Image (cartoon, rainbow, N blue to C red):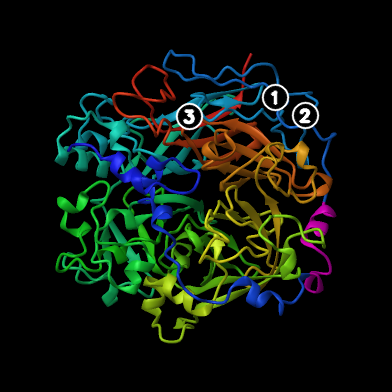
Amino acid sequence: MALIDLPLLMKDATRGKRSAVTCALKCASQCAVGPCNHSDNLTFRDIASSALSRRTVIGGSTAALAIALGGTQGAFADPGNGNGNGKGNGNGTGKGKGHGDDKGKSGALAPNGTKLRFEAIAPVDYTVDEFTVAEGFTWEPVIRWGDPLFADAPEFDWNAQSAEAQKQQFGYNNDYTEIQEIPGSHGKRAVMFVNHEYTNENLMLPPETDEDDRIEIGMAAHGLTVVELERKNKNFAYSYVQGAELNRRILLDHEFALTGPASGGNLLKTVEDPTGTTVMGTLGNCAGGLTPWGTLLSGEENFHGYFRTPGTSAAEKRYGLADKATARGWEAKHDRFDARNEGYENEPNRFGYIVEVDPFDPTSTPRKHTSLGRFKHEGANVILAEDGRAVAYSGDDEVFDYLYKFVSRDTYVEGDRAHNLTLLENGDLFVAKFAGNSPAAEIDGSGEVPADGAFDGTGEWLPLVVGGESAVPGFTVEEVLVNTRLAADAVGPTKMDRCEDVEPSAHSRRVYVACTNNSGRGTAGKAPADEANPRSENRDGHIVEIDEQGDQTSTGFAWNLLMVCGDPAQGDTTYFSEFPVEKVSPISCPDNLAFDSVGNLWISTDGAPSGIGYGDGLFRVTLDGEARGRVEQFLSVPRDGETCGPIIHDQDRTAFVSVQHPGEDGTWGSQLSYFPDYDGMGPKPSVIQVLPQRG
């Protein structure tokens, strides 16, 4: 059969909120299979009674501390006053129809003085195939799946796709996105980095497509893209520049260098790479981060869905690797995707890392950093510590898995780019253990706030590798960095509700963790609710705020929950740092995080449709002052779509998002979305810019 047999795969559909098709193709329906973490390390309740109250550490709750830091402007507006509209106009441009101006609205507040003022839009039904923006704004595609990148690249043709063409075109399911101005361009030119997480060949290709062609086209649609952008000035949208010098596609047949202590080790050697230092390609890329030295990081997440293995070892089981045919069947054509083949047993060990790419050097070799550990990385984000070391935070995006921190051995040197490019190659690796300060009886899985008025406590960064040595008894450094989940299990960290994006704020230096959801929390045989994950069968997710107490390299921290998500109007138990729940935009399944220039948090969501009935979107959250916890929805994406890779340029009153898997539940012959061109052909994952409407 030329296309993926999704009805068969959907028998193992997730219990969560995401489309069963998305689950089958993105994460091999891992939720339906069940959690990979069966460790019996201490539960949160076991340690809560002995935890040191974080109030004794910082002299008050983080919520109280934040409220004292600053104010906001204007009265609180009820959610959903905005009447933005964003349906495509059908002429191939995909422009939105938002109208009016963005000034002077009763709800168009400006937290911390941001120039990006808007009224929150009303939630949009998840079946609506529109890109909806706040009133006074419009939208433009920056680049779409299949757009030609190079001077001689062919134009996209729905009916004549090929692997060679796709290698020269923008890939599928764009996720993490970052834009950097090209020095000396006066704001008119930029370079954009985008990764491509996975493919849905049932939407992409006609049913009669040859099986080998389907495999090769799908492989070519994975990977990474670097592309130059240009605009007239900040009042105009960016367009991508075909044939530009920095344009690049990084594919599964491109060489990556393995760095760090595990590089060259026996666990990374294969018949095609007996040195264990070079791997071909990257896949399953999800979120990422921009380093202080201008390179891009991308997290290899659900790599397990691309490999068939014996599935017998503890490590294979812990990573979800199994002896079953994969959705795309690459193992039938390419030996390296079948770890049952002699000489390829370690091939899966070469995926699941943080990838670093230099977007300004198209000849550079991308690197996979073993020092940050191997797991299902959502991404990684770096902040420089007070002593100049690089500190990278990363979440393992699976239910009941962990939050990690890396601290570089060496320090950042201003102006020495060659040196700074080595900072993620060596350092210390830690995993987080949380403790709450409320009586266990008050954390009953309902999500009700405990008597002290906040979900909060202290935490500890448990060492995995320190000073180049393993801190885990019975594990070598190589074993810690290749089988990081097993090593972490051994030291007893806290099982979290899918740690996805983890973003440190350059303004406050606090760290924010998006915990997307966990339908298994508190169910039979699973870890119970705890103060850091306070809701059983957690459908809607929550946001953790971490205070490293003035030292990003510290092994102790204070924490609180910024919000417990949901829709109060539907009776959900929610919490928004004491902000009135009736005055927030409903939000579910926080995924990617970003900050604007004045320190407001922005959240993109993944999974809202089948939960609270609304499409995924982009939301702004006020972090400080009396409006701390206020959530305002800025945009909503089309049917079945996920909001990814938010970039906020609030000084230009503009924002960018990557729209992934629109129309996911359709098929080639029965498409459910026509975003962004609305030309009757089918959906194209795209990077979108939102900007004020001109005229």
CA gap, disc 1 and disc 2 = 8 Å
Classify mark 3: residues with Cα within 10 Å, few (<14), some (14-19) or many (20+).
Answer: many
Task: Locate residue 251, reporting x and y percent.
Answer: 28, 47
Circle 3 or circle 2, nearest the eye:
3
In-image side of 57 versus 482 (left or right): right
At a point 56% along the width and 59% down the height, the residue shown is: 521
Q: Which mark is residue 107?
A: 2
Mark closer to the chain start, 1 or 2: 1
Identify residue type, mark 2: Gly
Q: Which residue is rendered at x = 24% and y = 27% of the image?
A: 154
Q: Secondary structure at mark 1?
A: loop
Reading the chain from its start, which is encountered first: label 3 or label 1?
Answer: 1
Residue at the disc numbered 1: 82
Instruction: Name the residue beneath numbered marker 3.
Output: 639
The local crowd at label 2, few if under 14, some if 14 to 19, many if 20 or more residues have their Cα within 10 Å, is many
**Residue type of the residue flagged with mark 3:** Arg
Numbered range of the magenta stretch: 55-69
How far is the residue under mark 3 from the one under mark 2? 27 Å
Closer to the camera, 53 or 228?
A: 53
